[in-house]
Image (spheres, coloured by chain):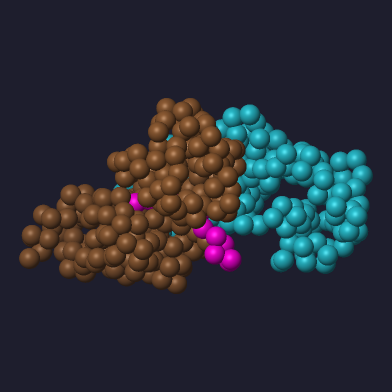
Chain colours: A cyan, B brown
Amino acid sequence: MIGEFYMNYLDYLPILKKLNAVEREELLNAAFTRKFGKGELLHNGNNDCTGLIIVLFGQLRAYTSSYDGREITLYRLFERDTCLFSASCMLNNLQFDITVSAEKDSEVLVIPSEVYKKIMEASAPLSNYTNEIMASRFSDVMWLMDQIMWKSFDKRLAEFLITESGVEESDTLIITHEVIGNHLGSPREVVTRMLKYFVNEKFITLSRGKIQIIDKKGLRKIAEI
Amino acid sequence: MIGEFYMNYLDYLPILKKLNAVEREELLNAAFTRKFGKGELLHNGNNDCTGLIIVLFGQLRAYTSSYDGREITLYRLFERDTCLFSASCMLNNLQFDITVSAEKDSEVLVIPSEVYKKIMEASAPLSNYTNEIMASRFSDVMWLMDQIMWKSFDKRLAEFLITESGVEESDTLIITHEVIGNHLGSPREVVTRMLKYFVNEKFITLSRGKIQIIDKKGLRKIAEI
C-alpha cells in the first residue's frame, strides 16, 4: 500500500527520497488526497491549517483581500506546485492571512501540518525543502510588489492577458472584468476602461464575459515582455 | 577566544545553543564584525552575498528600487535583528534583489554565506531558524503589500511619522520629503502635498529639513492606529 502510494507520489514530492525510511513512512501514512471543485476554498486565513498541499492536477490561486472584499492574486499554483501557507500554523513568525481557492477542478495531496511539522523539526532535508518553497513564494510576492509599485496599469493588464492566454492555451478568454480586477487588485471600472483602450488600439475585441486577443504582438509591446 | 566570542554573541544569536559543538565552533570561527557608517551599503542585489548579518547596534534599512531610482522601504532592522537576504545566494529559489543600507552608524556580526549554508544543509535547528527569519521578513512584506494596496496615502504617511517618532524617540524629525518618499515608494511632490495638508490640520509644523509633530493624537486618528 505504502509502496504503491510512494511510487505514485514520488514524482510530485521528490523530497521524499531524502527522508529516512521512518520519516517517509510516517509522512505517507498521514497523507491523503482531496478534490476541490472550481471556486471552492482550500484555505482561508491564518487560523485555517489544513497542511502542506501538493497540486496533483488542476489550478489554485492564492490571494489576499482588503477588509471591504477587494482582492489581489499573489501567485497561482499548477500541477506539482506546493502550497506552503495552507500549513501556515507550523511556521513560526508567519503573520499574514492568505486565501487559496481552486480556479479549476483540482485534486491535491495533503500532508497534515502536525505530521509535517514534527518531521521538519528533526529533518534538515525537509526543513531546507520548506525554505526553498518559501523563498520561491517570497520571490513571487516581491515580483508582484515591483509590478504594483513601478509598473503602470496598462502594462500589468497587457501582461495579465498574455499570461492568461498561455495558461488557458487559447486567445479567447472567458473572464469577467471583475475577476480580472480581483487578480490585479484594481476596481472593475479601471479594468473596463483600460480594456476599451485596448479595443481602440485593436489589440482585443470584447463581448459579454469574453475577451478575444487579436494582436498579441501589440499587447506584448505594451507589456514590455 | 571562541569562548569569549561565544559568550558575547550568544545573546544576539540564541540559535547557537541548539547547534552541536563542532557546528558552533565552525560558525563562530568564521564570524567577524564590521562597521558601517550612516548611508553606507551593506548589500546590493542578488549578486552580492556577504552572509547572514546580525545587527549588534545601529539601524539598517532594506529596500527595493525601480529601474529609474525610486525606492520603497521593505523593512528596517534594529539591534538583534537578523538580515537573511544579505546571504541570498545560499537560498535556492530566491530571485529578487533588495538593497540594505545603514540608516545610522551600525556594527554588525557577519556569518559568511558559505559557512552558514554548509551547516544549515546538515542542521535541522539552523535550517528551521532560517525558516523563521524568512517567515518574519515575508510577514513584513505582506503587511507592506496590504498597506500599499488597500490603505490611502494619508494613512500611510501619518503612520510613518508616528513610527519614525517612536524610532527616533523624538517629536522632531530631521528628514527630507524625498527620504520619506523613498520609504513609502511615493514621489516627493506627493509627500509634500500631504504634509501641507497635515500642517493645515495642525498635526505638524514644517521647517527646512524638519518636521515637528504637534498633535500625535490627530495623526493616530488619521492612521487608524
- Find residue B106 and report its horizontal and vertical position in percent: 26, 59
Whether residue B150 sits left or right of residue A103 in the image: it is: left
**Residue B225 in view, yes or no:** no
Magenta region, residue range: B66-77
Q: How many labels does the image show?
A: 0
- Find residue B71 and report its horizontal and vertical position in percent: 51, 58
Nearer the observer, A109 or A66: A66
Vertical placement of B163 versus A9: above or below? above
- Find residue A117 and report its horizontal and vertical position in percent: 38, 42
Give the residue drawn at x 73%, y 39%: A187
Give the residue drawn at x 44%, y 39%: B205
Give the residue drawn at x 13%, y 55%: B8
Looking at the image, the residue that sits furthest to the bottom is B47
Please check the rendered image and state whether residue A80 is part of the magenta-colored stretch, yes or no.
no
Whether residue B159 sits left or right of residue A57 in the image: it is: left
**Residue B7 in view, yes or no:** yes
Whether residue A165 sits left or right of residue A126 in the image: it is: right
Quadrant of the rendering where the C terminus of chain B is positioned: top left
Nearer the observer, B210 or B31: B210
Please check the rendered image and state whether residue B71 is part of the magenta-colored stretch, yes or no.
yes
Quadrant of the rendering where the N terminus of chain B is positioned: bottom left
Give the residue drawn at x 58%, y 51%: B189
Vertical placement of B94 versus A25: above or below? below
- Find residue B220 and report its horizontal and vertical position in percent: 45, 30
Nearer the observer, A34 or A151: A151
Image quadrant of residue A166?
Answer: bottom right
